[in-house]
Amino acid sequence: MAGMAMFASNLSSEVGLKLLLSPLNTNVVVRTACCSVGILLPVYSTFKAIEMRDQNEQQKWLLYWAAYGSFSILEAFTDKFLYWFPLYYHVKFAFLVWLQLPSADGAKQLYTNHLRPFLMRHQGRLDNILELFHGVLAKFISTHQTEIQFAQMLLAKSLLSVGSILQPGQGRVVGTIEGPAVQVETSVQQVETSESEDES
């Protein structure tokens, strides 16, 4: 009986220790850390740089976002293969920390040595692609203006409903600007009028 109790005690401490240490071996914790270090902290730091009007900090975080955005594009195409490698997220976490460390100045190095030369070399072609994309987007918006106005109307009504639920009796969302709501209501009437004319 004493042997069984000792075995159960040893087993529970071993299992408890494994459970305690196992999150460190899973990708969940490291992926969360990557999100926190790669996005949350830089967003707040960027906010502080903008609000304090610190040109050096703004420059630093612009370089970081350029490097991070380029890394994210690359990762979008390679993540399906790379995440199978052991310690992939640990390496990604270390890379994101390296990008931000003032002593390493990784984002500036990556931008200066790789990203800037690449973009300078292909700037004309990228400008043409961007111009084409803006043209297609403008055409899409003008073609689907009615649907966009209808979506705006649905969003405005949803916000008003949520606002009336959160603050009964007021019928509006606190902090919203009244002007656009009237504009959306006018758009709603135009959409409803055009729909009724189409049915006739």
Image (cartoon, rainbow, N blue to C red):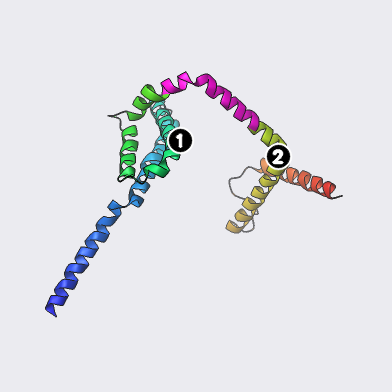
The label shown at residue 73 is 1
Instruction: Report the front residue among 107 and 115.
Output: 115
The residue lying at 14 percent from left, 80 percent from top is 1
Badge number at residue 31: none
Q: Position of residue 88 (x, y in %)?
A: 33, 43
For badge 2, the amino acid type reads: His
Q: Residue furthest left?
A: 2
Q: Is residue 87 left or right of residue 39?
A: left
Q: Residue at x 80, y 48 (%)?
A: 195
Left or right side of 185 for 94: left
Measured Cα–Cα span from mark 1 to mark 2: 29 Å
Disc with the residue nearer the chain's start (1 vs 2): 1
Above-or-below relation of 92 to 13? above
Q: Is residue 124 visible?
A: yes
Indicate whether residue 134 is drawn in magenta. yes
Query: Circle 1 sits in a helix, a strand or a loop, which is it?
Result: helix
For label 2, the crowd category at 10 Å Cα-Cα, with few meaning under 14, some 14 to 19 and many 20 or more, is few
Q: Is residue 160 left or right of residue 186?
A: left
In the rendered view, tell whether residue 54 sits above or below residue 77: above
Whether 193 is among the magenta residues is no
At horizontal 68% and vertical 42% (from top left) the residue drawn is 148
Above or below, comparing residue 159 to residue 2 in the picture: above
- Quarter-wise, where is residue 102 in the image? top left
- The label on residue 144 is 2
Question: Considering the numbered disc 2 on the image, is that residue within a helix, a strand or a loop?
Answer: loop
Relative depth, front residue between 132 and 23:
132
Residue 188 vs residue 137: left or right?
A: right
| Residue 38 placement: quadrant | top left
On the image, the x and y values in percent for residue 66 come to 43, 30
| Quadrant in which residue 44 is drawn | top left
- Provide the residue span drawn in magenta: 116-136
Kindly identify the amino acid type of the residue bearing the numbered disc 1.
Ile
